[in-house]
Image: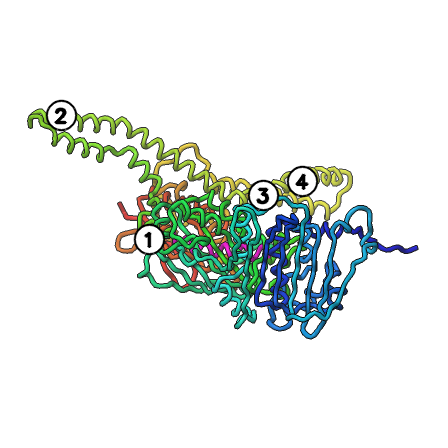
Amino acid sequence: MSYRIRPSARLISTIGKDLVKDKFAAVAELVKNSYDADATYSYVCIEFDKDTRILTISVEDDGHGMDLDTVVNIWLVPATSDKLNRKTSPKKKRPLQGRKGIGRFAAAVLGTEIHLKTKADKNKQVVLTLDLKDFSGEKLLDDVSIDIQESEEGGSKGTFIGVTDYDVTEKDVEEIWSAKQRSKLQLELRKLLAPTEVINTGKKLGYSVQSDKFDITLEYSGIPNIADKIVEISPFNIVDMYDYRIYGEISKNGTAEIRYLNQNVPSIKEEKLTTKILLESQGDQEFPGALSFDFRVFDRDPESIDALIGRGLIDPESGDKVGKRKARDILNENYGVSLFRGLFRIRPYGDSDVDWLELDKDRVQNPSRKVGHNQVIGFVNIESEENSNLIEKSARDGLVDNKHYYGLIHSLKMIMIQLEARRFEFRQKSFRGRKGKSIDKSIEDLFDYTGVSRKIKRKLTGLEIGHKQQVLLLESIEKEFNDEQKRKSDEYKRIKETIALYQGQATLGKITHVLLHEGRKHIKVINETPPRLLRWMELLLKKFDQDLQDKLYDRADLLVKSSKSLALLFKRIEPLAVTRRPNRKNILLNKEVIDNFEIFSSDLKRNSIETEIDIDDDLLIYSTSFDLTTVFANLIENSLFWLSLSDKKHKKITVEAGYFEGDLEITFSDTGPGFQGPNLESMFEPGFSMRPEGTGLGLALVGEAVDRMNGEIRAAETTEGACFIITIGRG
């Protein structure tokens, strides 16, 4: 026996009410249908008749309209594949927004009756009404009949969809379409429209937008407590008043062409660079086709808000100049990173409550360097589903989480890191951000009373007391300061030692994955081998077997090797696992470097990374194994990360050392992608990181350890890869 699925009539209201977020999204879906119909405008009207108590929300356009066959066999068919098959609109070749075939039923959110009036060129006008009360209760979908009329009525082609709600009071309308709700609708419609930059980049992605005019108009009629008015919807004017901007394109293979601007300093020319986006090595990311990006970043400190107002910010509703509070309100209304396909936004990307790039999550880890979600107005334009593999969900709540979506997020985060590095450098130099200091220098300042002593001396000099008394008083104060500083010196040393130990443990934490992987491998052998050896020995005692004896010897040898390897692994990390930092002494540098590379031997082999150490066997360095391990373990781990992402065939890490003009110079370099930021002098400050999920800890630990060795470290510009140079004086 065979049966058919017979959907309930409630399916229509379910599609509309349950799969569409709210009334703003419902209006947006109807406007998108106008866009798909090659219309040049979409006219939205919210009208209330207090005499009949009817509230009507309508969307009208001048698109290609529909004939009777299209209405019956496509418009009235939920989840039709028509747009999915066509992919682009017939005349203007717009990428179709409503491929799921359910957007028109979003109107169910807006009222109880849907009225359709449509006319295709050289065809009769088609009129129908869907009474949503019929699509409820226990009826089946095929039990509901729909009356459709054709008329010879004249008029131009296009479509009108009106949704009515009956028995609505003025109080109801005031609540449904309050000032806040109207503002939210206008913002929703404004965000649908792509700014000029998105239109231009759409051309580069192959979208036909040369003369693609599409306007949205919103009319209010009869709404209580407001005058009837017509609002022309236009993109935000705030987008051109950014502090920083980074924009460009990423090719389908990950090559990024980037332009960067800082509007705080008009004399600074636009910076251009080309870089390769590197995907994470786990294999859960793929490039999402070609795309364009445009991020506008706004600082929110009082000085920057003043600059924003000074650039000409006006109220989008009244056209008046704004104060600081209103400026912040406008930012709060408009921030978010919008995702476009062609000229239309994909919801909910761009909504202020959707931080899909997780900018705030990253900012919590590093607030002084990272940009927050509420500081960005961004636009990203992607290719069609066929070219990008970025698939929209049926529920209109974003894209399907697949490898290409994760690749999209990763690529955009790598772009944002480029902006953050340049922004941080500017804020440091212009004293808008906290100036970075080494930890040791910060502690030293806490225990330095020189500045306070100098201020007190200046104050005393201005007092009307005798010179002799003044001198005695100054000497007494200076002695008190000196005595206090001496008493605090031991505490100062203790704090420095404690922080150094914590830094060593932080390094140990960064290489935990290595310890776990290597340790588990050897522990598994140690756990599993002895029982086998005992069993084989018992068998041999009963009856001699040469093959079994050879097998026993082999496994016993493997057990010894694993035991020695585990002991060696612990020995190599031992310098970091101390309770107090040892005193400095002369140490063989070559041996220390080799030991640190051995910690990562498996990762180096797995990623086919060659190593070269060019250091004389007898070259000594005055240091501790603790500090040397902190330096080289972090540098090697950093190079491993970037080399593992690189698609270069030749991957290599090189360490060289020798004396140059009386100083010991150590050069650490790799053949990876090189430095990903412009401010090489800032990368040893806590928080600096060019990794998407980086903590900015590794290179800061390196800088602190080199400082304890009375040395200096700098990042050097090279034609290929990254290069660090450590200089340590003989003294």
> How far is the residue under mark 1 from the one under mark 4?
47 Å
Q: Nearer the viewer, mark 1 or mark 4?
A: 1
Asked if marks 1 and 3 touch (Cβ < 8 Å), the reply is: no
- The disc placed on residue 168 is none
Q: Earlier in the sequence, mark 1 or mark 2?
A: 2
Query: Hey, which residue is sitting farthest bottom in the picture?
Result: 122
Secondary structure of the residue carrying numbered label 3: helix
- Which x, y percent locates residue 302? 35, 45
Residue 143 colored magenta? Answer: no
How packed mark 4 is, by other alpha carbons closer than 10 Å (few <14, some 14-19, many 20 or more), is few
Asked if marks 1 and 2 touch (Cβ < 8 Å), the reply is: no
Q: Residue at x 52, y 55 (%)?
A: 229
Asked if marks 1 and 4 touch (Cβ < 8 Å), the reply is: no
The amino acid sitting under disc 1 is: Glu
Residue 419 colored magenta? Answer: yes
- Which x, y percent locates residue 379? 50, 58
Secondary structure of the residue carrying numbered label 1: strand
Check the picture and name the quadrant holding the C terminus: top left
Q: Residue at x 69, y 40 (%)?
A: 533
The amino acid sitting under disc 2 is: Leu
- Which x, y percent locates residue 358? 52, 48
Q: Earlier in the sequence, mark 3 or mark 2?
A: 3
The amino acid sitting under disc 3 is: Glu
> How far is the residue under mark 3 from the one under mark 2?
74 Å
Q: Residue at x 36, y 32 (%)?
A: 495
Secondary structure of the residue carrying numbered label 2: helix
Q: Earlier in the sequence, mark 1 or mark 4?
A: 4
- The disc placed on residue 175 is 3
Read off the magenta span. 405-423
Q: Which residue is mark 1?
A: 665
Q: Which residue is mark 2?
A: 473
Q: Earlier in the sequence, mark 1 or mark 3?
A: 3
